[in-house]
Image (cartoon, rainbow, N blue to C red):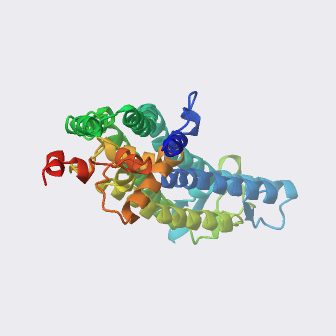
C-alpha cells in the first residue's frame, strides 16, 4: 500500500507546473496574428511600392521624354524635359483660341502619396500600442499567472488530501470532512473568475480594438477614393502637350507653342495603382472578419479551463453580450496559449475525462487527479450508510 501511495505522490509532483519567475512580458503576443498580418501588409506594401517608384526614377533618369524641335540643342532639349516635368500640365485646344489645361500632378506625387498612405495606415497601430497594450499586457500577465497557479493549487490540494487519507485511521471521518469541504466550497478560488466576470462590464479594450479596425476601413475607403478620383483620371494618358512659352520665351517665335511629351514612368504608375487596389481589396475582408470575431464568444479556452474549481463561466451561463473586454482578452489568451503551461495538462485531462469508461462524478481537475492518485472522487458506496452494513 505504501508503494502505491509513493507512486501517487510522484505522479502528483510531476503534474505540478514549474514556478516561472522573472520577466515574461517579452514572450507575450500583444497583437493577434491576423492583426499583425494586416499591419505588415497595410504599412509595408506602400513602402515597397514607393521604393519601386524611386528605383525606377533613379535608374531611368527623367520620368518623361519630350519631342523637342530638331533645331534645339542638347541643353535646350534637357531644359524642355525639366520645364515640362516641373509644370506637368497637359494643354489641349478646346476650340478656336481656347486652351484647356489638365494637371498630371499624381505622377509627380506618387512616391510621396505612398509614404503618406503608409504613415496613415500606421496610425491605428500607434493607437493600439499606446491606448490598449499597457492595460492588456497587465491583464494577460495576471490571468496567465492565476490560471497556472489555480492548476497548481488543485494539484497541491490533492497531495494534501492524499496525506490526510494516509494519516486518517477512520475513513468515515475523512470522507465526511471531504464532503463538508466540497459543500462549503473550500476547494474553490473565485478570485480569477470574479475578475473575468468584472471584465464583462468593461469596454475600454474592445472600444480601442473596434476603433483600430474602423480606422483601417476608413483609411482604406479614402485610398479607394484617392485612386479612383486622381489616378484613374490620368491612368490611360501616356502623352501630353506641354507649353514652355512663358517668361522670357513667351515672345520667341522659333519656340513652338506646344511640345509633345511622353510619360516613360507610366508603367510603374499603373503597376502601383493596380497593386494598391488589389492589396487593400484583399485586406478589407480580413479586417471585417476581425470585427466579426467580437460578435461571438471563443469558448474553446473556457471549456478547457472549466476543469479548474470555481471556473464555471460556461456552465453557469455567465457569458452575456460578447462585445466587451473579456472577449478581447480571451482572443489574446488563445494567441498566447504557449505561455499557458497548464493548458496542455488540462487539455489532456479533458480528453481523458471524456473518454473514460468508468462512470465517476468527475467535474474538476481535483476530482480527476484524486481518482488517478488512487482515491475515490466521492464517498464509496460501502461507506455511505454504515448502519445498513451492521444491520442487514
Which of the 4 image quadrants contains residue 25?
top right
User: How many numbered markers are drawn?
Assistant: 0
Q: Which residue is depicted at the point 43% across and 39% down?
A: 155
Q: Can residue 331 be spotted in the picture?
A: yes
- Nearer to us in this view, 360 or 127: 360
- Nearer to us in this view, 94 or 312: 312
- Residue most extreme to the top: 22
On the rendered image, what quadrant is the C terminus found in?
bottom left
Instruction: Please provide percent x and percent y for residue 212.
Output: 41, 45
> Does residue 162 appear left or right of residue 338 in this picture?
left
Is 96 above or below relative to 313? below
Instruction: Please provide percent x and percent y for residue 381.
Output: 24, 53
Q: Which residue is depicted at the point 63% across and 67% down?
A: 271
Instruction: Please provide percent x and percent y for residue 165.
Output: 37, 37
Which of the 4 image quadrants contains residue 236?
bottom right
- Residue most extreme to the right: 74
Q: Can residue 250 be spotted in the picture?
A: no
Is 276 above or below relative to 145? below
- Residue most extreme to the front: 391
Q: Which residue is depicted at the point 42% across and 57% down?
A: 287
Instruction: Please provide percent x and percent y for residue 144.
Output: 45, 38
Q: Which residue is depicted at the point 59% across and 54% down?
A: 46
> Does residue 98 appear left or right of residue 63 in this picture?
left
Is 387 above or below relative to 194? below
Is 274 above or below relative to 375? below
> Does residue 258 appear left or right of residue 210 in this picture?
right
- Nearer to us in this view, 380 or 377: 380
Amino acid at each position: 500500500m505504501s508503494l502505491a501511495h509513493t507512486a501517487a505522490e510522484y505522479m502528483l509532483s510531476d503534474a505540478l507546473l514549474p514556478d516561472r519567475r522573472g520577466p515574461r512580458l517579452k514572450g507575450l503576443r500583444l497583437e493577434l496574428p491576423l492583426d499583425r498580418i494586416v499591419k505588415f501588409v497595410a504599412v509595408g506594401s506602400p513602402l515597397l511600392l514607393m521604393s519601386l517608384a524611386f528605383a525606377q526614377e533613379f535608374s531611368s533618369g527623367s520620368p518623361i521624354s519630350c519631342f523637342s524641335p530638331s533645331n534645339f540643342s542638347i541643353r535646350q532639349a534637357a531644359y524642355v524635359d525639366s520645364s515640362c516635368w516641373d509644370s506637368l500640365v497637359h494643354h489641349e485646344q478646346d476650340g478656336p483660341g481656347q486652351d484647356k489645361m489638365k494637371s498630371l500632378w499624381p505622377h509627380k506625387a506618387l512616391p510621396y502619396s505612398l509614404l503618406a498612405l503608409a504613415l496613415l495606415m500606421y496610425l491605428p497601430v500607434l493607437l493600439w500600442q499606446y491606448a490598449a497594450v499597457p492595460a492588456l499586457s497587465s491583464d494577460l500577465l495576471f490571468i496567465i499567472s492565476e490560471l497556472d497557479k489555480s492548476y497548481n493549487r488543485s494539484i497541491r490540494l490533492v497531495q494534501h488530501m492524499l496525506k490526510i487519507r494516509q494519516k486518517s485511521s477512520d475513513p468515515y471521518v475523512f470522507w465526511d470532512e471531504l464532503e463538508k469541504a466540497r459543500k462549503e466550497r473550500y476547494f474553490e478560488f473565485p478570485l480569477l473568475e470574479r475578475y473575468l466576470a468584472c471584465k464583462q462590464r468593461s469596454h475600454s479594450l474592445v472600444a480601442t480594438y473596434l476603433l483600430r479596425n474602423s480606422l483601417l476601413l476608413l483609411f482604406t475607403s479614402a485610398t479607394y477614393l484617392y485612386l479612383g478620383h486622381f489616378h484613374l483620371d490620368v491612368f490611360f494618358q501616356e502623352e501630353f502637350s506641354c507649353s514652355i512659352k512663358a517668361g522670357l520665351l513667351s515672345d520667341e517665335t522659333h519656340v513652338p507653342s506646344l511640345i509633345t511629351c511622353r510619360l516613360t514612368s507610366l508603367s510603374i504608375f499603373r503597376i502601383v495603382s493596380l497593386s494598391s487596389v488589389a492589396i487593400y481589396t484583399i485586406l478589407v475582408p480580413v479586417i471585417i472578419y476581425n470585427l466579426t470575431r467580437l460578435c461571438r464568444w471563443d469558448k474553446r479556452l473556457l471549456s478547457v479551463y472549466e476543469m479548474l474549481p470555481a471556473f464555471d463561466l460556461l456552465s453557469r451561463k455567465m457569458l452575456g453580450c460578447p462585445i466587451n473586454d473579456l472577449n478581447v482578452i480571451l482572443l489574446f489568451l488563445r494567441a498566447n496559449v504557449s505561455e499557458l503551461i497548464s493548458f496542455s495538462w488540462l487539455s489532456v485531462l479533458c480528453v481523458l475525462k471524456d473518454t473514460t469508461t468508468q462512470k465517476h462524478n468527475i467535474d474538476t481537475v481535483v476530482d480527476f487527479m484524486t481518482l488517478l492518485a488512487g482515491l475515490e472522487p466521492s464517498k464509496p458506496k460501502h461507506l455511505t450508510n454504515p448502519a445498513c452494513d451492521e444491520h442487514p
